[in-house]
Amino acid sequence: MAEGGLERFSAGVRARVVVPDGVTATVTAQPDHLLRWFGLRFAGHEIERQYRGWRIATATPFARVGYIGSIPSWCLLLVAVTVIDAESVSKTVPPIAGWIALLITLTALTLPQALRPSVMPLAALANCLAGFLIIWLLFDVLLTSEAPAWRAGVMTGGMLIVMFFGFAIFRVPPIFAMAAVTPYVAFASYRLYDSYDAGRLSVVEAGGLGAIQWIAYLGCLLVCIVIEIVSRRSFCKDQIIGAQQRDLQRSAEAIRRYVPPAVAKHIVAGDTAGIGEPSRRRVTVQFIDLVGFTMLADRVEAEVLTLIVNDFMSAMSDIVDDFGGTVSEFGGDGFMALFGAPDEMDPEEQAVCAVRAAQAMQARLPELEGAWHKLGATEPLTMRVGINSGVLSVGSFGSHGRMIYTAIGLQANIAARLQAKCEPGGILLSDASWHLVKERIRCEPRGEVDCKGVHYPVRVHVPLTE
């Protein structure tokens, strides 16, 4: 791509837009995702700064592995020199031992978070020192009795290994890599030329080894540049994936805010089968109404009223959630809750949890009232609860544009009528729910009540406080 060209990575799609020099084009790309200099730099300074921090975090493990991987090699060289070439021990052991100690220190410096920014410059400096050290050891110290061509060849081989670390293993940027490798490659080429000029190497030997060094140099540099380009693209993808994950997280949080947690769990997981088409299920329905709210609404400011409603709904919804229920509908100063949907629950457990939740809500209301009194809402507030169990049509109802998860049917109507017939501050159970809880919750019969829309009287019970 020509200088001046731009490359863009957008969420979900990677788009390449080439802009020739001197031509003005409108690019809808997010500026932070624009690459220039053949893909070796970001156009935005802020994203470039973020990339450098990301690169340090990702390259540090490679530098650490490079140090740790080279320490055994230098230790073996130290042992070999001590055992095989005793005459050179006094000259070679101190620098090799010092170098091993330096590698251990550099490895330790990759661990503290505060020192991470210095890892790549130190890796480049370490590689440069290693290159000069290996050239000196193999060409001037350890192989002095060998033929010049053999010494030069071994020196080139050792230098290529160090060069590979500088360009690839340490994962430093190309500029750092060139600064780390070029000095000792140039020095090695100078030693070859010096040997040729002194007549110790033929033109073929010196020229061939020099060509090997610089061909390897250019090849490793190309690999380093490719690694840098790939790293920048990986960073872009990480940014895109991170942004998508944050968007999904925000969407999931919004869903949980407007949809009951049990239903939101199915939506986020993509399991719409459990909440989609309505089906007949045995559930326990609970209706709650706040008594005295209408009178309170005429006596307090709208802001205070909003706060009271939100406090009441939040506290009671949390209690329903704690007992495994699902708040399916809010309506004014009351709401409807289901036990046994969308997640399956044993019928007896449904009814018991519904009663326990109702008792917990009644116990929580005085605490809320104490806080509301400080806002000027001194009117007494009580709560009525009606509970019924039976088979209902449960699922998503509504239009294509907006659906609500709820239950409809005669048994839901009965629960609503029982709530209306309940005394303020009380809980009224239908006979169907009582039969499910009677072994675990003491209840007191309260006769029969007539429910509007129901063609028979409904026997009711009141759970007693334990």
Image (tube, rainbow, N blue to C red):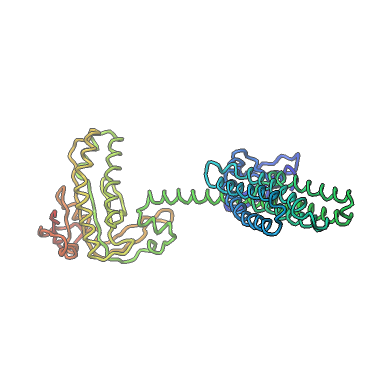
Residue at 25% x, 33% y: name it. Answer: 375
Closer to us: 167 or 227: 167
Q: Is residue 88 visible?
A: yes
Name the residue: 31% across, 61% down. 341
User: Camera-side residue: 261 or 308?
Assistant: 261
Instruction: Look at the image and tell me in which quarter the C terminus lies.
Output: bottom left
**Camera-side residue of 263 and 390:** 263
Does residue 410 show up? no
Q: How many marks?
A: 0
Q: Position of residue 142 (x, y in %)?
A: 74, 54
Quarter where residue 216 is shown: bottom right
Q: Is residue 351 above or below residue 39?
A: below
- Residue 460 falls in which quadrant of the image? bottom left
The percent coordinates of residue 286 (x first, y second) are 24, 56
Expressed as whole percent of the image width and height from the top left, the position of residue 166 reads: 68, 50
Q: Does residue 341 appear left or right of residue 229 in this picture?
A: left
Q: Residue furthest front?
A: 87
Q: Is residue 455 left or right of residue 307?
A: left
Residue 233: % across, % down: 63, 51
